[in-house]
């Protein structure tokens, strides 16, 4: 745990930070200003980058008309993302940061929750990158820019949350979380760079458990909080179709095998504390079938869009559960 209060000008900085983050309203204003600055920088950087790519496209097409991205749409997307992000930050502030923020500190939490929280960071970063890249694609920017903006968004959009954790007396800035955030974006960008498509899809499923009633202040007291905080009910999956790797096979391109990871009996972030409370935490691994909704052919643009969005979620299906208790068949697992 590193405390910056001992650094030069530490007391002054400490007082300044304490004032800045004394109340939620000011925190929202601070992040709005930071996010707006990032947005403005990105907006002003787009024309210079996009013009090079569009000029190259024009030369390759052997035309005299220069293809330019839709900058108006780009700015609209940035504005919408900013509003959505600020709303998300406000909601997280109400759910997570209930104690007053204090000194900035670091925390090694890689051993906590049997790494389920890290899986959540990987998944979230990947999905932000995937959805953001798809939105940018509609603006006419180059594929390279689309991928870069998507990957960067997956990292940048979660960084302020890590900073808030750093000022929270309950958490601390986690380098493990940052590594997980980067990993999620790399999983998306790396697949496009390697295969020119996404073949392995990180997905999520959740079911409510009775463990949240044991410690509702930690695992959630409302349905929304339980969905967010109760790691015992979360499962993270990696789904892929054999057809993506064996092009000449007769395997349906939309039918996937899915490998999942979950935990059970974690009523505290630490194993020892859970054991003290009478529980023995353990890991769970899953093998199941899944459907790639983006590979289902349809002429409807609405259905394609719905399938793209819904493809973030693992469909309920039969599954094999493997844990220290042995192998168990789940006829309908979500």
Image (tube, rainbow, N blue to C red):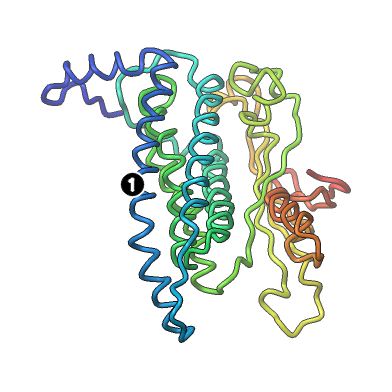
Q: Toward which corner of the image does residue 218 lie, by quadrant?
A: top right
Q: Which residue is pictured at 35% across the width and 34% down the height?
A: 34
Assign a secondary structure to mark 1. Answer: helix
Outermost residue, front side: 64
Image side of residue 87 versus residue 26, left or right: right
To which residue does mark 1 refer? 41
Q: Foreground residue, 161 or 65?
A: 65
Q: Which residue is pictured at 40% across the width and 64% down the height?
A: 50
Q: Which residue is pictured at 79% across the width and 50% down the height?
A: 315
Q: Foreground residue, 31 or 72?
A: 72
Q: Foreground residue, 262 or 239?
A: 239
Point out residue 300 in the picture as x, y percentages from the top left corner: 80, 60
Point out residue 287 in the picture as x, y percentages from the top left corner: 74, 56
Q: Toward which corner of the image does residue 208 lie, by quadrant?
A: top right
Point out residue 182 in the picture as x, y percentages from the top left corner: 44, 51
Quarter of the picture containing the N terminus is top left
Image side of residue 289 versus residue 175, left or right: right
Quarter of the picture containing the C terminus is top right
Point out residue 159 in the picture as x, y percentages from the top left corner: 41, 39
Q: Is residue 10 above or below residue 187?
A: above
Outermost residue, right side: 331
Q: Toward which corner of the image does residue 84 lie, by quadrant?
A: top right
Q: Is residue 6 above or below residue 285?
A: above
Q: Which residue is pictured at 61% across the width and 29% down the height?
A: 229
Q: Residues within 10 Å of mark 1 (few under 14, many from 20)?
A: few
Q: Is residue 41 above or below residue 165?
A: below
Q: Is residue 219 above or below residue 142?
A: above
Number of callouts in the render? Answer: 1
């Amino acid at each position: 745990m590193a405390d910056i209060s001992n650094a030069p000008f530490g007391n002054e900085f400490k007082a300044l930070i304490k004032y800045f983050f004394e109340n939620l309203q000011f925190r929202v204003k601070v992040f709005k200003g930071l996010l707006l600055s990032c947005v403005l920088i990105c907006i002003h950087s787009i024309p210079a980058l996009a013009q090079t790519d569009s000029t190259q496209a024009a030369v390759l097409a052997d035309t005299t008309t220069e293809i330019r991205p839709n900058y108006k749409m780009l700015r609209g997307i940035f504005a919408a993302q900013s509003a959505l992000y600020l709303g998300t930050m406000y909601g997280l502030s109400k759910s997570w940061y209930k104690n007053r923020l204090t000194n900035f500190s670091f925390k090694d939490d890689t051993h906590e929750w049997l790494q389920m929280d890290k899986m959540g960071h990987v998944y979230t970063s990947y999905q932000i990158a995937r959805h953001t890249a798809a939105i940018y694609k509609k603006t006419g920017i180059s594929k390279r820019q689309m991928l870069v903006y998507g990957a960067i968004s997956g990292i940048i959009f979660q960084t302020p949350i890590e900073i808030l954790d750093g000022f929270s007396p309950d958490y601390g800035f986690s380098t493990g979380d940052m590594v997980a955030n980067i990993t999620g974006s790399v999983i998306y960008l790396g697949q496009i760079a390697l295969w020119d498509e996404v073949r392995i899809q990180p997905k999520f499923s959740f079911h409510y458990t009775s463990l949240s009633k044991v410690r509702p202040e930690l695992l959630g007291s409302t349905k929304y909080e339980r969905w967010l905080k109760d790691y015992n009910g979360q499962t993270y999956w990696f789904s892929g179709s054999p057809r993506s790797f064996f092009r000449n096979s007769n395997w349906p391109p939309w039918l996937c095998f899915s490998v999942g990871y979950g935990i059970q009996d974690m009523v505290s972030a630490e194993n020892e504390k859970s054991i003290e409370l009478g529980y023995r935490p353990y890991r769970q691994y899953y093998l199941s079938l899944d459907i790639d909704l983006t590979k289902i052919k349809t002429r409807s643009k609405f259905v394609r869009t719905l399938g793209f969005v819904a493809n973030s979620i693992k469909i309920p299906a039969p599954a094999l559960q493997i844990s220290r208790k042995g192998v168990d068949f789940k006829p309908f697992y979500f």
